[in-house]
Amino acid sequence: MSADNPPVGDALDLPPPALRDVLRVCLSAKEYRFLHESVIKRAPAVQNKLPSPSRYDVIARPKNRLREAAIRSSLRVFVGSRIVLKLADLLIKSASSLFTIVGFLSLVLSFYKLTLYLINLTLHNALRRPSVDLS
């Protein structure tokens, strides 16, 4: 029997196929196992409400592991990029003058570090040269 057509006794235990597809794409069994362990450590009261990792394995049995892993990764990149762009847009709108000040101060700090580096390099080279004996 395939994962989409479970035996009659298990039909009531499994969620609908669409939900299984969503779970399959969102989290792999290994990731769910890790999340389950960390949630149980932090909040043991929810242990009875969460499906066990072995139950999740049955619910989200992968049809094509590579395809689902690729979809999962691309969704994570998309969501992460969207969050970063939203945060950047929020920061630019709310603190454009702050960016100008921060940019100026970082430029000053860069020139300061470059100057110290050049002075240190010059002193280091001067101390490595053999001294000239005038006597």
Image: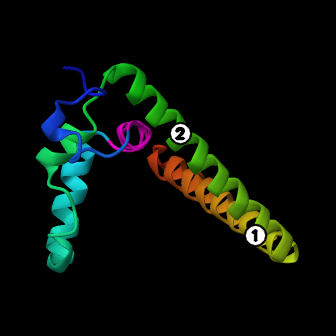
- Residue 103, visible in the rendered structure: no
Query: What span is colored magenta in the figure?
Result: 17-27
> Is disc 1 surrounded by few (<14), some (14 to 19) or many (20+) residues within 10 Å?
few
Look at the numbered discs 1 and 2 and tell me whether their residues touch, using CB distance below 8 Å. Answer: no
- Tell me: 57 left or right of 64: left
Q: Nearer the viewer, residue 97 or 50?
A: 50
Residue found 62% across the figure and 59% down from its top: 119
Residue found 15% across the figure and 70% down from its top: 47
**Which SS class for mark 2?**
helix
Is the residue 42 above or below the residue 55 in the image? Answer: below
Which residue was labeled with disc 1?
A: 91
The disc label shown at residue 75, or none = 2
- Tell me: 124 left or right of 5: right
Residue 74 in magenta? no
Number of numbered discs on residues: 2
Q: In the rendered structure, which amino acid carries the disc numbered 2?
A: Leu
Residue found 49% across the figure and 52% down from its top: 124
Is the residue 91 above or below the residue 65 in the image? Answer: below
Q: Residue furthest front?
A: 8
Q: Position of residue 45 (x, y in %)?
A: 17, 80
Q: Position of residue 55 (x, y in %)?
A: 15, 47
Give the number of the mark in front: 1 or 2.
2
| N-term-proximal mark, 1 vs 2 | 2
Q: Nearer the viewer, residue 76 or 48?
A: 48
Q: Which of the 4 image quadrants contains residue 109?
A: bottom right
Is the residue 134 above or below the residue 61 in the image? Answer: below
- Residue 75, visible in the rendered structure: yes
Q: Which of the 4 image quadrants contains residue 1?
A: top left
Residue 18 in magenta? yes
Q: Residues under labels 1 and 2: Cα distance?
A: 24 Å
Q: In the rendered structure, which amino acid carries the disc numbered 1?
A: Leu
